[in-house]
Image (cartoon, rainbow, N blue to C red):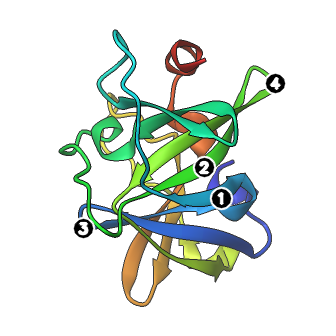
Amino acid sequence: MAVAEITESVQYLTFKLADEIFALDVAKVREILELTTITKVPQTPDFMRGVINLRGSVVPVVDMRLKFGMSMTEQTVNTCIIVVEVSLNGDSLVLGALADSVQEVVEMEPDSIEPAPHIGAKLDTNFIKGMGKVDDHFVMILDIDKIFSTVELEELT
């Protein structure tokens, strides 16, 4: 969904990775968990931190900082796992996303969202729905379905 497709006010869950604020459509968020024991799975991509047991289900956990080329997420009192639903070939995949902290749920009007910046031809920014503004800070609105490639998601299942 590009900015042109955002035609009504939407609620977003904002969270921090390093000093940057990101947002996800709350419709994609299932729940937010305190950081728990993550079991490492051998021979998985670096950004795949492992799996957790969520009420009897095995849920893969990815480090969003590593996926975005930042340093690994450090464990603090605010570190959490955002459990999201990602679409994969018409199916739904439950995934845990490590974040430094969750901020708040904000409602953004379509006219307060700018298109994602185009930063060269080789840099893929399709996973950014747009740039919103909350309290004089830019917020990168993510399309969780486009952050991971189909190949990456198939490796997690």
**C-alpha span from label 3 to label 1:** 23 Å
* Place of residue 94 in the rendered image (x, y in percent of width and height, measured from the top left): 67, 36
| Residue on which the image places disc 4 | 90
Q: Amino acid at mark 1?
A: Glu
Dots 3, 1 in contact, CB < 8 A: no
Question: Which of the numbered marks, if any, corresponds to residue 19?
Answer: 3
- For image coordinates 47% across by 36% down, the residue present is 61
Q: Quadrant of residue 56?
A: top right
- For image coordinates 64% across by 78% down, the residue present is 108
Dots 3, 2 in contact, CB < 8 A: no
In the image, 104 versus 38, the foreground residue is: 38
| Residue on which the image places disc 1 | 31
Please say if 147 is above or below 98.
Answer: above
Sequence-wise, which precedes: disc 3 or disc 1? 3
Q: Is residue 82 left or right of residue 2?
A: left
Sequence-wise, which precedes: disc 4 or disc 3? 3
Q: Residues within 10 Å of mark 1 (few under 14, many from 20)?
A: few
